[in-house]
């Protein structure tokens, strides 16, 4: 049985034709800009067909509950009908750029230096320098998934708003908040890539099922980071 192509969203390319994507400048990013401005800059740099798909998606939000009760809101985003292999190719390329640069994890050296500097503002009585260094190593491990600019933003926020030494959980929450818009975009791009690969139009190498499986795993990872 041959799958029938769905109608493509406005501005989409022919789903049966996969063309080479031209080179373009890196995604623009200014970590000091407000989250709304960062989102607009990233969206404006994406190809028009991909922006159309992103703007046409459906968003459902539902409460999330943890061990202590209400724990925020979870976003479920689904693409419109008609996502093609060409859309998937664009989404994968943008996702690779996003996760490989803007959302790339901080280096261990940067993390350790930032954490030691933060903890030095809140010295712990009776703690030796050796133990303090081991504590910082634990922090570096537990914050290792976040980009350097998000860790820097979290440390700056804590210094300017709190009088006491933070916990790792509190710093993780601030890091997640700092890069939430970028991870939301990464999750949506992952969903588009999965939907386009599942259409069976044949973009990229490998089988359609294999590509879709890898992209579902990537989308799941993005969802876990956002959760």
Image (cartoon, rainbow, N blue to C red):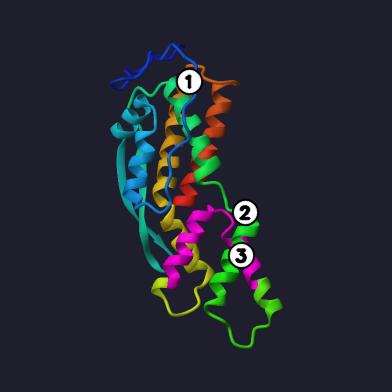
Horizontally, is 133 left or right of 87 in the view? right
Occupied quadrant, residue 133: bottom right
- Residue 24 in the image, given as x and y percentages of width and height: 46, 27
User: Which element type, helix, strand or loop, lies under badge 3?
Assistant: helix
Which residue is located at x 51 percent, y 46 percent? 103
- Residue 181 in the image, given as x and y percentages of width and height: 39, 48
Horizontally, is 153 left or right of 75 in the view? right
- Report the span colored magenta: 135-159
- Residue 214 in the image, given as x and y percentages of width and height: 57, 33
Residue 168 or residue 207, whichever sits in front: 168
Mark 3 = which residue?
113
Label located before the other in sequence (2 or 3)? 2
Which residue is located at x 45 percent, y 41 percent? 186
Horizontally, is 87 left or right of 134 in the view? left
The answer to whether 102 is drawn above or below residue 142 in the figure is: above
User: Which element type, helix, strand or loop, lies under badge 2?
Assistant: loop
Mark 2 = which residue?
107
Residue 111 or residue 10, whichever sits in front: 111
Membership of 109 in magenta stretch: no
Marks 2 and 3 sit apart, C-alpha to C-alpha, by 10 Å
Marks 1 and 2 sit apart, C-alpha to C-alpha, by 31 Å
Which residue is located at x 59 percent, y 60 percent? 111
Mark 3 nearby-residue class (10 Å; few <14, some 14–19, many ≥20)? few
Q: Nearer the viewer, mark 1 or mark 3?
A: 3
Query: What label does residue 21 carry, if any?
Result: 1
The answer to whether the residue labelled 1 contacts the one labelled 2, judged by CB atoms less than 8 Å apart, is no
The answer to whether 2 is drawn above or below residue 71 in the figure is: above
Which residue is located at x 45 percent, y 66 percent? 156
């Amino acid at each position: 049985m041959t799958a029938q192509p769905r109608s493509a969203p406005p501005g989409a390319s022919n789903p049966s034709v996969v063309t080479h994507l031209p080179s373009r400048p890196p995604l623009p990013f200014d970590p000091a800009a407000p989250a709304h401005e960062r989102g607009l800059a990233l969206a404006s740099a994406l190809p028009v067909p991909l922006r159309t798909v992103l703007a046409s998606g459906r968003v459902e939000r539902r409460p999330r509950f943890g061990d202590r009760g209400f724990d925020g809101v979870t976003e479920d985003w689904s693409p419109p009908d008609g996502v093609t292999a060409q859309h998937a190719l664009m989404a994968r390329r943008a996702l690779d750029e996003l996760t490989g640069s803007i959302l790339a994890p901080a280096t261990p050296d940067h993390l350790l230096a930032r954490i030691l500097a933060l903890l030095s503002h809140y010295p712990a009585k009776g703690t030796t320098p050796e133990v303090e260094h081991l504590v910082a190593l634990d922090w570096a491990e537990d914050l290792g998934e976040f980009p350097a600019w998000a860790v820097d933003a979290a440390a700056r926020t804590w210094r300017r708003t709190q009088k006491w030494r933070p916990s790792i959980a509190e710093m993780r929450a601030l890091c997640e908040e700092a890069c939430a818009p970028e991870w939301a975009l990464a999750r949506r791009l992952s969903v588009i890539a999965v939907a386009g690969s599942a259409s069976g139009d044949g973009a990229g190498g490998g089988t359609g099922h294999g590509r879709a499986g890898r992209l579902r795993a990537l989308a799941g990872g993005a969802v876990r980071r956002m959760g």
